[in-house]
Image: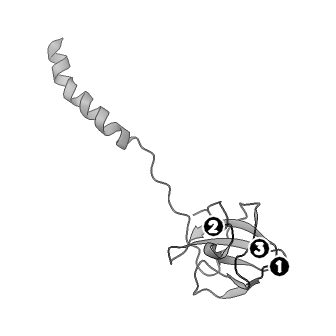
Amino acid sequence: MRSLAVKFLPLAMAAAFVSPFALAAPASAAPAHYPCGGTPPDLDPAQGIRKANGVNMRTGSSTSCASRGLAHLSHTINYHCYTVGQDGLTWTYARNLSTGFAGWMRDDLLTDYGSQEPCPQ
């Protein structure tokens, strides 16, 4: 009996050491970058407020994408979801309820830093 314990003890110790890493869930992936023209689903019922007046609402999560319109401080916007742009910053897709325009806005231009719901990949 002792020989079995001695034989398998190193394997049991190795399994105890390795298994937390081997069984750990994979890290969650960052939300997908949306290219110019990308439109995600509406996953967030929240409404937001801009920090700046005249924030561009772009066709994608990049300053190289065209602007569809502007969101002013007096406008109400409805969040859909957020993503990480090519610039490494987060962007929220939203619909401007005051004008009907929809587009991507950088989260650092929003008072509450945008949507809390990641866009699907």
In the rendered image, which residue does mark 3 sit on? 95
* Marks 1 and 3 close (CB-CB < 8 Å): no
What secondary structure is marked by label 2? Answer: strand
What's the distance in space between the residues labelled 1 and 3, CA to CA? 14 Å
Name which of mark 1 and mark 2 comes first in the sequence: 1
In the rendered image, which residue does mark 1 sit on? 74
Residue 68 at x, y percent in the picture: 72, 85
What's the distance in space between the residues labelled 1 and 2, CA to CA? 22 Å
Query: Three-letter amino acid code at disc 2?
Result: Tyr
Tell which residue pokes out farthest to the top in this image. 1
Q: Nearer the viewer, mark 1 or mark 2?
A: 1
Task: Pick the quarter of the image with the C terminus.
Answer: bottom right
Residue 28 at x, y percent in the picture: 50, 55
Residue 31 at x, y percent in the picture: 56, 64
Q: Which mark is residue 105?
A: none
Name the residue rendered at 16%, 23% in the picture.
Answer: 7
Instruction: Give left or right: position of 9 versus 98.
Output: left
* Marks 3 and 2 close (CB-CB < 8 Å): no
Name which of mark 3 and mark 2 comes first in the sequence: 2
Q: Residues within 10 Å of mark 1 (few under 14, many from 20)?
A: few
Vertical relation: 12 (above or below) 99 = above
Query: Three-letter amino acid code at disc 3?
Result: Arg
In the rendered image, which residue does mark 2 sit on? 82
Name which of mark 1 and mark 3 comes first in the sequence: 1
Q: Nearer the viewer, residue 21 or 115?
A: 115
